[in-house]
Amino acid sequence: MTKQERFQKEFQEHVKEGLTAYPKYLSSRYIYDEKGDVLFQKIMALPEYYLTQAEYNIIDQHKDALAQIAIDEKGIDLIELGAGDGKKTKVLLKHLNDRKANFTYIPIDISQHSIDELTSSIKDLWPDMDVQGEQGRYFSVLDKLASYNNRPKLIIVLGSNIGNLEHPEAIKFLEQIQNSMSDKDYLFMGFDQKKDPLTIQNAYSDETGVTQEFNRNLLHRINKEMDANFPVDTFEHWESYDPETGTAKSFLLATQPCTVKINTIELDINFDKWETIHTEISQKYDDRTVEWLAQQAGLKIKEIYEDNDQLFKNYLFIKN
Ligand code: AVJ
């Protein structure tokens, strides 16, 4: 079976499981096809979606502290999980380059397309930079990371991507990273913070409807890839943020009753009016929660960095 076939099979099983459950759910991980990637880039450019700017601000302010790690260690492997377009990382790459640090940049992303684009744009900017991109899912690539042991690693995970995971999965994710780390390695990770609930609500339900399109892309994909007939426009995006747990939840709401035929997996699904499909969580954190997650995963916080508007934090972890 090819990678692509395996992915399709997984996606089909997931759709069957999630849409026959009550309440219904689908995973946001399937939003990201080519169109989903473009929609997410549009989200990152929205004024409401403060996360990207905030983390950019943190990296810009603290690039020297991060570069110092590479200088002090006389060379590092800089490994980025979920590199995407690398816009924020390039601030750090430039600084590492300016300071003549010795490093190899290893961007890892699920999308081969992203890796290729990123690699060629870096080659244009800095022809001599050592870049060794790899395509793969976090979990499968993480094992491989342990073998990058010639010199200290700085592993970076930006964008609060961990927020898509519920705490037990987030701990597993951190644990897997921890397992691939030696005592000399560092993990630098972004965690979006609890804040005015309205700010969060707005970031995930923008006026222009880009987030709604992003969420609906799940249904478009099922229509396209599983020969289904979701009346996509009758499903509305809904966002709800719970300031106590810090969990922002996305839903697709059936504003009309309907029956959806998903031919490839021979499934008919009924939706009542106002029935929900839960599609995504975007967890918000505070220091106590991050400390707890880290400790559960055998890590400890070495440093905390915050943006000027106090919206977002990046934590530098080492092995406990
Ligand atoms: C890519 C997981 C960080 O949850 O903030 C943006 C995805 N969803 N708007 C997030 C997303 C809706 C994003 N992450």
Image (tube, grey):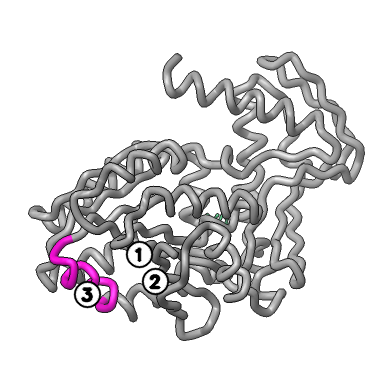
Quadrant in which the C terminus appears: bottom left
Under mark 3, the amino acid is: Gln
Q: Which residue is mark 3?
A: 68
- To which quarter of the image does residue 126 belong? bottom left
Q: Is residue 70 magenta?
A: yes
Mark 2 near mark 1, Cβ–Cβ under 8 Å?
A: yes
Sequence-first tag of 1 and 3:
3
- At 33% from the left and 45% from the top, the residue drawn is 145
User: Mark 2: few, some, or many residues within 10 Å (few <14, many ≥20)?
Assistant: some
Q: Earlier in the sequence, mark 3 or mark 2?
A: 2
Q: Is residue 10 above or below residue 27?
A: above
Q: Is residue 119 above or below residue 247?
A: above
What SS does tag 2 mark?
A: helix
Instruction: Kindly identify the amino acid type of the residue bearing the numbered disc 2.
Output: Tyr
In the rendered image, is residue 83 in sight?
Answer: no
Per the rendered image, the range of residues in magenta is 64-75
For disc 1, the marked residue is 88
- Badge number at residue 56: 2
Quarter location, residue 195: bottom right
Q: Name the residue at 28% across, 42% down.
A: 147
* Mark-to-mark CA distance, 2 and 1: 5 Å
**In the rendered image, the vertical position of residue 76 relative to residue 118, given as above or below:** below
Dominant secondary structure (helix, strand or loop) of the stretch shown in magenta: helix
Closest to the observer: 234 or 253?
Answer: 253
Q: Quadrant of the N terminus?
A: top left
Tell me the amino acid under the disc marked 1: Lys
Q: Residue at x 23, y 55 (%)?
A: 77
Residue 71 at x, y = what percent? 16, 71
Foreground: disc 3 or disc 2: 3
What secondary structure is found at the residue carrying circle 1?
Answer: helix
